[in-house]
Amino acid sequence: MISAEDRTFLLKLILLILYLDWAICAGCDSNQLLYTEIGCKPIFENGSNSCPVAYDCENVFIRSSDNCYLNGNVYSPKDNISRIDSELSLCVSGCFCDQRTKNNKTTTAFTCDYDQCPSYFSLLSEGCYYKFDNNLCCETESYCQNNNYTIHECIYDGKTYKDGQQFKIQNDYQCVCSPEFNGTANDKFCRKFKCNYELLYMENILNRDAPLYYEEKNGCPINWYQSEYEYDFGTVEVNGTISSNSHVCKYGNLSVPIGQQLKIDRLSTRNSESDTHKTICTCDTPPLITCITGKKTILNDKYNMHIT
């Protein structure tokens, strides 16, 4: 029997793998999916509408700690989420607002059951693939092609997909190939990709923890650095001129100016021991710190970090 903690970890890992399958680098994507999902508003400088300099998340940070929030709806402790909210959140079911007290600290967050798809625990035979329904979390069947039967194929962005296969479009849609697919995202064949931040990570967000991404500055985090824990204590490392911009990132109660690095205690030893990998935490797009880990060569190529 898989424990609730293991199921939560498994779902987060699956969401990360799905996101990394299609995410591409863009100059102003730091924490963009996170801010968008939880309802923050982009702030542009001098009337520009290119890259936000920060996001206004005060409407999130002032939420009552006695309730749960999802897609603009408010839930009291023990409330089950609505059918509509459940349909918008794939791979989770039976979610309800749960209030717990541990070590004299009361938290209110969602508790969910997580779908365990057969494909997570099995291998396909050669020449076979999984078919999906865009409104379901798990595969609907495994299909092995018969050479005497011609199967429909979709072509998007130079890649070919077979009938029922999942693929990504426009950087933020998950689609399913079908004979009716016409090359553009629409509600019938595609759905917005989500990391379920409000269901899984709101305690981290409200604590101003730092999301850790793998070789991308956006998408679903692989972990969080938590400011309240001693081994995750941080200090600001100032390099160059501090921006005069009034926006800053918060890590717990610590303020980090835009463009500056956050040094987290447990990272110093880890980074010094690796010749090939690096973890860096910076204030890119407030109000949260952005942490990224991966191979030095990839981080240098994507983000011009000048890592040695």
Image (tube, rainbow, N blue to C red):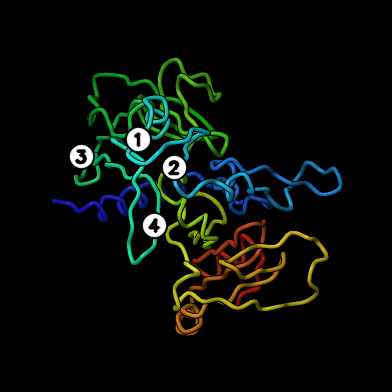
**What residue sits right under mark 3 in the picture?**
118
Mark 3 residue element = helix
Q: Nearer the viewer, residue 51 or 196?
A: 196
Residue at 50% x, 59% y is: 213
Mark 2 residue element = strand
Left or right: 1 in relation to 102: left
Q: Which mark sits nearer the N-terminus, 1 or 3?
A: 1
**What residue sits right under mark 1 in the picture?**
79
Left or right: 153 in relation to 241: left
Disc sitting over residue 68 in the figure: 2
Q: Nearer the viewer, residue 19 or 158?
A: 19
Mark 4 residue element = strand
Q: Which mark sits nearer the N-terminus, 2 or 1?
A: 2
Between the residue at mark 3 and the residue at mark 2, the CA separation in whole angstroms equals: 31 Å
**What residue sits right under mark 4 in the picture?**
106
Disc 3 marks a residue whose amino acid type is Pro
Between the residue at mark 4 and the residue at mark 3, the CA separation in whole angstroms equals: 36 Å
Between the residue at mark 2 and the residue at mark 4, the CA separation in whole angstroms equals: 13 Å
- Asked whether disc 2 touches disc 1, contact meaning CB atoms under 8 Å apart, the reply is yes
Q: Nearer the viewer, residue 282 or 138?
A: 282
Q: What is the residue that sits farthest to the left in this orientation?
A: 1
**What x and y, as percent, mark residue 185?**
54, 25
Q: Which mark sits nearer the N-terminus, 3 or 2?
A: 2
Disc 1 marks a residue whose amino acid type is Asp
- Asked whether disc 3 touches disc 2, contact meaning CB atoms under 8 Å apart, the reply is no
**What x and y, as percent, mark residue 240?**
78, 76
Count of numbered circles on the image: 4
Q: Which mark sits nearer the N-terminus, 4 or 3?
A: 4
Disc 4 marks a residue whose amino acid type is Thr
Between the residue at mark 1 and the residue at mark 3, the CA separation in whole angstroms equals: 30 Å
